[in-house]
Amino acid sequence: MKKIILALIIMLAGFTTQAQEKKDKNAKVDIAVKGNCDQCKRRIEKAAYAVKGVKSAQWHEDDQELHLIIDETKCSANSVREAVAKSGHDTDKVKATEEAYNNLHSCCQYKRS
């Protein structure tokens, strides 16, 4: 009888742990990124995808936003900001160096604040 009760408890514990919701490691993040054209779009998205853990990156010229889906166990939004800034584009929290900005094509040089 004790063995049967023990077996039932173990089975219930197994079902309970399977029923628990797993924590989602993916996060949606929006980052403001300055740019002007399709050339900027390609450069910004390429810089974002270069960061390990970025699953989706889409920059929109009309709202100047980079929409991301990232694996938070592999990267952070700040690491993406730094990569984009290295490519020459200012983000909401990390600014591109003067050298990186000056290396942009003339049509890509946006007004800096």
Image (cartoon, rainbow, N blue to C red):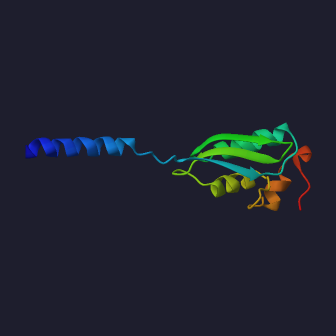
Residue at (74%, 46%) from the top-left corner?
Answer: 66
Q: Is residue 20 left or right of residue 70?
A: left
In the displayed structure, would residue 106 be above or below residue 112?
above
For the view shown, which residue lies furthest in the front direction?
A: 1
* Total numbered circles: 0
In this view of the protein, which residue sits in the foreground, 53 or 104? 53
Picture coordinates of residue 105 (x, y %)?
A: 87, 45
Q: Is residue 46 left or right of residue 23?
A: right
From the viewer's side, name the closer residue of 70 and 43.
70
Instruction: Tell me the residue at 72%/54% (across/down).
Output: 86
Residue 71 % position (x, y):
56, 47
Q: Is residue 113 left or right of residue 20?
A: right
In this view, the residue in front, 35 or 6, is 6
Residue 93 % position (x, y): 74, 61
* 19 in relation to 93, above or below: above
> Which residue is found at the position 77% from the left and 61% from the top?
95
Point out the image quarter for the N terminus.
Answer: top left
Left or right of 71 on screen, residue 103: right
Q: In which quadrant of the rendered image does the C terminus lie?
A: bottom right
Q: In the displayed orientation, state which residue is furthest to the left.
A: 1
Q: Residue at x 9, y 46 (%)?
A: 2
Q: Position of residue 79 (x, y in %)?
A: 63, 55
Up/down of 26 relative to 98, above or below: above
